[in-house]
Image: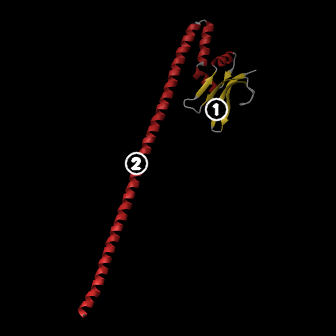
Amino acid sequence: MAVKIRLSRHGKKNFAFFHIVVTDVRSPRDGRLIEQIGIYNPNTNPATIVLDGDRALYWLTNGAQPTTTARRILSYEGVLLKKHLQGGVAKGALTQEEADKKWNAWKAEKDAKVSSKKQTVSNASAEAHKAAVSAEAKVNEARAEAIAQKKAEAEAAARAAAEEAAAKAAEEAAAAAEAEAAPAEEAQPEA
């Protein structure tokens, strides 16, 4: 029976995540499996990989062939390096302690790279949020100034209209006073 290590798709449309499974070559992609050895979620940044490295190494040593993507995931997690080092131990080129030391050094370096990437992503996200907040504050200030300017213009127009109306009322009152005074003057010369 030919065995493959491959990905089985799960999740919803345009938001998939994958189970890393050991399965018979003849079974369909999401069909019958022998064992699930991990989960791969490419939707996060960086991608989330949860892998049982010991079971993956067991299946690789027993002849399971990983697909291209599964091979990359296994390499990323160090399973292929561990298999390579175990081959060196079996041939007598290394001792088990040396192999473990090399693998632990590689794993520490890899974990440092991943944590620095996570830190960089979170810092970039925080800076983008700060920039968005400051841009929004500037827009809000500009809107507030525009609203204040419109209110001032409206108040000035209302004041001008009120002054104009008062001036017009004063002119009308003066004209009315003159009109009252003129008939009174006309009436006095006749008397």
Instruction: Identify the residue at horizontal 37%, vertical 64% (top origin).
Output: 158
Q: Earlier in the sequence, mark 1 or mark 2?
A: 1
Residue 25 coordinates in the image, percent (x, y) = 73, 25
| Quadrant of the image containing the C terminus | bottom left
Residue 141 is labelled as: 2
Q: Residue furthest left?
A: 189
82 relative to 48, above or below: above
Instruction: Identify the residue at horizontal 46%, vertical 31% (top origin).
Output: 123
132 relative to 191, above or below: above
Provide the secondary structure element on which disc 1 rests.
strand
Q: Find disc 1 in the rendering and name its residue.
A: 17
Residue 87 coordinates in the image, percent (x, y) = 62, 11
Instruction: Identify the residue at horizontal 39%, vertical 54% (top origin).
Output: 148
Residue 30 coordinates in the image, percent (x, y) = 72, 31
Provide the secondary structure element on which disc 2 rests.
helix
The answer to whether residue 71 shows anywhere in this view is no
Of the two numbered discs 1 and 2 in the rendering, the one whose residue sits closer to the viewer: 2
| Quadrant of the image containing the N terminus | top right
Query: Is 172 left or right of 128, judged from the image as shown?
Result: left
Instruction: Identify the residue at horizontal 63%, vertical 19% (top origin).
Output: 53
Residue 58 is labelled as: none
Q: Residue furthest front?
A: 191
Quadrant of the image occupied by residue 26? top right
- Looking at the rendered structure, the kind of residue marked 2 is Glu
Q: Residue furthest bottom?
A: 190
- Looking at the rendered structure, the kind of residue marked 1 is Phe
